Image (tube, grey):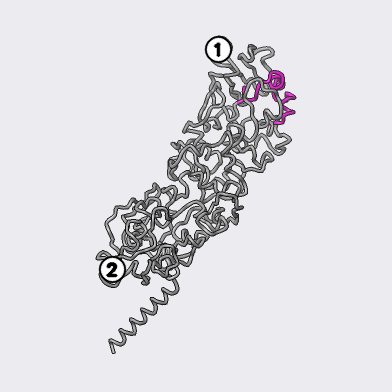
């Protein structure tokens, strides 16, 4: 009777096994028998399981395994943001690699050699190789990674995700070698334990701060068909469906650190932000004469880098790809496009996250002294944070309300609601010349412009520039041209700009000027261009002296004419 029960139990387990085979592995590329559907398969071997399993004489390291598990020293994944430490592949991961590292022939079985139609060669995506640095890390305890606030804790309680001793993550945590029910574009089936549409598998473990409201999680934008294909390895049609795979590849990633699709950081953005998926062509702005040079560096940016010492610029230095969104804001508050980015506040302290737009700009244009000098000035200050300091005698109102409430040229016809008490953004000047703000159809933001240094409109700085709206369009957008030329704020504006053809920049420093008594007064953004304005003989620098409301004098030489600070040179 006992033997009868054992026999029935054996038949039952065999029935279940055969039923599962009929439902799954027979129709996948892991069926390497002669009946298999894939390109790589046996020429005559009819058994399905034999390519991995054998009931007798198996590998001594792993029961029932029909391949030799040879010692291999794999190159492991590394990242500055990785909290856990991967070990050499073990358990089921090591078994997967007996085929997928490309070292052992598919038909090299312990029970005898089987001739196949081909091998997993390096040009195939299924050949992971021995360099695992560009693959999702394996053979580490999930528990070790939960110190990262963007990792789900406790471990996900989903029966489809198999963890091993001490919650070890292995290949089979995400992949089921016996089933392939979630295929991408047919030929790219990945044996996933669940469909990864909308990043469903990724977010079982990863909970990126801000993700739920980001376009990558909710956008229904589709590709218009113009090459290049932004999603060459999935069948999905929208940004939201592609989820994490808009930018990341879990295997054979172009940039190993953080598993980015491309080594050049900006190219993880351009395939969508070229007008073929996203509605605006941001990439076009980076092809303009003046642009943030994202192409200059590769592989330097680190998410946890100190913003006080950063020496490069990438898209992700300004934008958080997991958290950016369409939330609008008013100056100086940060908008959704810069959501959850680090910054430097106006006191030079790291702000995490940044609260104001200028704090993101200050990461590069403040204490790192990466400011480019387009005009040589009396007070030559490379630190933009200091230029906008509220302790200065004058500054454009970016970090706070301006000091002069009496500005007759404000408002203008183009900015009719602007007041001297308003605060403005850096991007009210530093913006694309095709921005909607100037009637264009391009993207907003300081990506690039035909006008240097990344200016929204034309701003001539050369001496003897004929006055016109076009020459000084950047200034005239906010400052009423008619008021300026009518001398409503300074009685010699028209003579200087129209008759003498002196550019605005010859006298005015657009960011701001720190206090420097040795070089005169610096109210009204007065900070002379020393290539145009010279000191009088015997003086060190050209001087402006503020004598009160709309009253002052100049002591300098300009256009070969000496201004003595008296008579016609005082007002």
Q: Is residue 352 visible?
A: yes
Q: How many marks?
A: 2
Q: Residues within 10 Å of mark 1 (few under 14, many from 20)?
A: few
In the image, residue 358 sits, relative to residue 269, either above or below, namely above
Q: Tell me the magenta residue range.
A: 479-508
Q: Mark 1 against mark 2, which lies toward the viewer?
A: 2
In the image, residue 143 sits, relative to residue 353, either above or below, namely below
Q: CA distance from mark 1 to mark 2?
A: 96 Å
- Identify residue for label 2: 111
- Identify residue for label 1: 539
Q: Going by the picture, which residue comes out furthest to the top?
A: 538
Q: At which x and y percent is residue 10?
A: 33, 81
Residue found 33% across the figure and 63% down from its top: 107
The question of residue 395 being in magenta is answered with no
Residue found 39% across the figure and 69% down from its top: 33
Q: Is residue 142 left or right of residue 506?
A: left
């Amino acid at each position: 009777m006992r033997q009868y029960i054992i026999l029935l139990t054996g038949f039952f387990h065999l029935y279940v096994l055969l039923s599962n085979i009929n439902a799954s592995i027979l129709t996948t590329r892991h069926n390497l028998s002669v009946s298999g559907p894939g390109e790589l398969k046996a020429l005559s071997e009819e058994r399905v399981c034999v390519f991995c399993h054998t009931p007798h004489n198996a590998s001594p390291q792993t029961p029932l395994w029909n391949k030799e598990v040879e010692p291999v020293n794999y190159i492991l994944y590394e990242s500055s943001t990785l909290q856990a430490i991967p070990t050499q592949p073990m358990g089921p991961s090591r078994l997967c690699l007996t085929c997928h590292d490309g070292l052992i022939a598919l038909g090299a079985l312990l029970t005898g050699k089987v001739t196949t139609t081909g091998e997993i060669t390096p040009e195939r995506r299924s050949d992971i190789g021995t360099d695992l640095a560009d693959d999702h890390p394996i053979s580490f305890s999930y528990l070790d990674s939960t110190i990262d606030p963007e990792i789900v804790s406790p471990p996900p309680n989903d029966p489809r995700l198999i963890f091993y001793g001490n919650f070890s993550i292995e290949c089979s945590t995400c992949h089921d070698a016996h089933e392939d029910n979630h295929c991408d574009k047919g030929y790219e089936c990945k044996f996933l334990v669940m469909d990864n549409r909308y990043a469903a598998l990724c977010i079982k473990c990863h909970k990126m701060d801000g993700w739920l409201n980001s376009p990558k999680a909710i956008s229904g934008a589709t590709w218009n068909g113009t090459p290049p294909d932004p999603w060459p390895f999935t069948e999905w049609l929208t940004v939201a469906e592609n989820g994490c795979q808009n930018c990341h590849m879990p295997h054979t990633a172009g940039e190993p650190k953080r598993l980015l699709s491309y080594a050049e950081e900006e190219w993880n953005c351009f395939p969508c932000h070229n007008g073929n998926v996203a509605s605006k062509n941001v990439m076009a702005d980076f092809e303009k004469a003046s642009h943030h040079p994202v192409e200059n560096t590769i592989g330097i940016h680190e998410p946890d880098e100190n913003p006080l010492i950063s020496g490069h610029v990438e898209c992700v230095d300004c934008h958080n790809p997991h958290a950016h969104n369409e939330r609008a804001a008013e100056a100086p508050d940060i908008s959704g496009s810069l959501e959850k980015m680090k910054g430097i506040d106006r006191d030079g302290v790291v702000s995490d996250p940044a609260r104001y737009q200028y704090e993101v700009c200050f990461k590069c244009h403040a204490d790192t002294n990466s400011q480019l000098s387009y005009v040589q000035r009396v007070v030559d200050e490379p630190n933009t944070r200091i230029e906008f300091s509220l302790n200065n005698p004058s500054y454009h109102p970016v970090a706070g309300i301006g000091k002069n409430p009496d500005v007759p040229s404000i408002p203008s016809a183009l900015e009719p609601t602007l007041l001297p008490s308003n605060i403005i953004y850096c991007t009210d000047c530093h913006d694309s010349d095709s921005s909607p703000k100037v009637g264009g159809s391009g993207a907003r933001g300081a990506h690039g412009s035909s006008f240097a240094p990344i200016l929204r409109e034309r701003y001539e700085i050369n001496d003897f520039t004929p006055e016109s709206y076009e020459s000084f369009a950047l200034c005239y957008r906010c400052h009423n041209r008619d008021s300026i030329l009518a001398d409503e704020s300074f009685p010699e504006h028209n003579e200087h700009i129209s008759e003498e053809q002196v550019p605005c920049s010859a006298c005015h420093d657009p960011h701001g000027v720190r206090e420097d008594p040795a070089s005169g007064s610096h109210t009204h953004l007065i900070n002379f261009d020393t290539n145009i304005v010279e000191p009088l003989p015997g003086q060190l620098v050209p001087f402006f002296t503020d004598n009160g409301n709309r009253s002052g004098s100049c002591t300098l030489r300009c256009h070969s004419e000496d201004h003595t600070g008296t008579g016609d040179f005082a007002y």
